[in-house]
Image (cartoon, grey):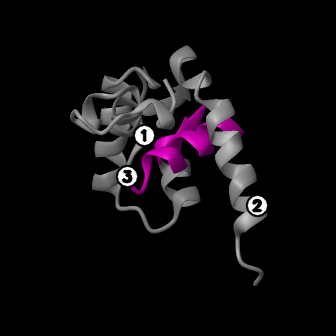
Amino acid sequence: MSLADYKGDGNIQETPFGYTLSLIGGKWKMLILYLLAEQQPVRFNEMKRRLGTITYRTLSSQLKELEADGLVKRTEYPQVPPKVEYRLTEKAETLLPVLEQLCEWGARNQPAR
């Protein structure tokens, strides 16, 4: 199904496009996935540092949602202090070509600085 296939006679949230946006929509989820695509595994504090203005609470919440949706795998190591790492799942890896296309679109259309 493509965007052109949507006839507008139903709830757009129930389309495959709506499903995809429910998983990766919002300000932070695609940035988290992009970061994990660049480097894996990533620890929580490193991710927070690289994302910049995101709060600890928001990052934690977004990671929990991505994990619940099967896009991020969380590995906790039993040690003191606790060590937790995040990486992409196979399901998330299938999104990488889409993220690459978005990146290419941005490179072509971003205003010159």
Q: What distance separates the C-alpha of mark 3 from that of mark 2? A: 20 Å
Residue beneath the point at 68% across and 31% down = 97
The image's mark for residue 66 is: none
Crowding at mark 3 (Cα within 10 Å: few <14, some 14-19, many 20+):
few
Residue type at the position of mark 1? Ile
Q: Quadrant of the C terminus?
A: bottom right
The image's mark for residue 24 is: 1
> Is 34 covered by the magenta stretch?
yes
Residue type at the position of mark 3? Gly
Residue type at the position of mark 2? Ala
Report the side of 70 relative to 33 (left or right).
left
Q: Which residue is mark 2?
A: 107
Percent across and percent down for residue 76 are: 42, 23
- Answer yes or no: is residue 82 visible: no
Q: What distance separates the C-alpha of mark 3 from that of mark 1? A: 7 Å
On screen, residue 80 above or below 31: above
Q: What distance separates the C-alpha of mark 2 from that of mark 1? A: 20 Å
The image's mark for residue 26 is: 3
Crowding at mark 1 (Cα within 10 Å: few <14, some 14-19, many 20+):
many
Q: Which dot, 3 or 2, sits closer to the camera?
A: 2
How many numbered marks does the figure carry? Answer: 3
Please give the range of residues in magenta. Answer: 26-44
Sequence-wise first label, 2 or 1: 1
**For the residue labelled by badge 3, is the local secondary structure a helix, a strand or a loop?**
loop
Percent across and percent down for residue 13 are: 26, 36
On screen, residue 68 above or below 11: above
**For the residue labelled by badge 2, is the local secondary structure a helix, a strand or a loop?**
helix
Sequence-wise first label, 3 or 2: 3
> Is 99 covered by the magenta stretch?
no
Q: Are marks 3 and 1 in contact (CB under 8 Å)?
A: yes
